[in-house]
Amino acid sequence: MADVFHRAADWAIEPERRVLRVVWDDGAVSEYEWEALRRGCPCAFCSGEGSYRGNVDAATAFTAEQTTLSEVFPVGRYGLTPAWADGHDTGIYTFKMLRRAAGLG
C-alpha cells in the first residue's frame, strides 16, 4: 500500500492548555504539548546533524520562555515551523513527522 501524504488543513495555538492543535486534511485532529514539541525540535542546533551532537536531550531543562509557543508558520506544502518566545524558530516539523508523533502516520 502506498504511503499517503496528509497536510495540515488548519492549526491553532491554545495558550490556556499549552498545546498546538492541528486539524488534518482527512479530518483527524492532533494535539502537541508545547514542551514535548520543543524537546523534539528537528533543527541542527537542537537535534544535531552529521557527526554534530545536538544540544537538547531528555535531561535538558527548559525555561518557560523556551516552551512558550508564539506563532506557527507554514513551510511550503510540507510542514510547520514553530516560533518560540525565546526567539528560536529554525525547526521544520514536516507533516509526516507530526502525523507519526500523533500515532496517525
Image: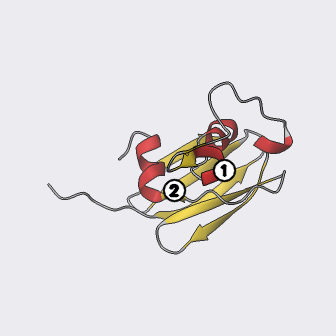
Q: Nearer the viewer, residue 99 or 65?
A: 65
**Residue at horizontal 28 percent and vertical 59 percent from the top:** 4
Residue bearing the label numbered 1:
45
Lateral position of residue 103 relative to residue 49, left or right: left
Tell me, for residue 73, which label it has, or none: none
The residue lying toward the viewer, choosing from 2 and 46, is 46
Q: Which residue lies furthest to the left in this view?
A: 1
Q: Is residue 49 left or right of residue 59?
A: left
Q: Which residue bears the numbered disc 2?
A: 23
Residue farthest to the top, as pictured: 59
What is the spatial separation of the Cα atoms under label 1 and label 2, in whole angstroms? 28 Å
Looking at the image, residue 39 lies above or below residue 84: above
Residue name at image x 73 percent, y 40 percent: 18
Is residue 53 visible in this depiction of the protein?
A: yes
Nearest the viewer among 91 and 18 is 91
- Rendered view: 46 above or below 72: above
Residue 83, image quadrant: bottom right
The residue positioned 66% from the left and 56% from the top of the image is: 12
In the displayed structure image, the side of residue 31 where residue 70 appears, left or right: right
Circle 1 crowding by C-alpha within 10 Å: few under 14, some 14–19, many from 20? some
| Circle nearer the N terminus (1, 2) | 2
Residue 6, how many percent across, how many down? 38, 61
Farthest residue toward the bottom? Answer: 76
Query: Label 1's element?
Result: helix
Disc nearest the viewer among 1 and 2: 1
Q: Quadrant of the rendered structure where residue 46 is?
A: top right
| Element type where label 2 sits in the image | strand
| Rendered location of residue 21, percent (x, y) | 60, 50
Amino acid at circle 2: Val
- Up the image or down, 34 lies above or below 50; here it is above
Instruction: Name the residue type under label 1.
Output: Phe
Binning the other alpha carbons within 10 Å of mark 2 as few (below 14), some (14 to 19) or many (20 upward) gives: some
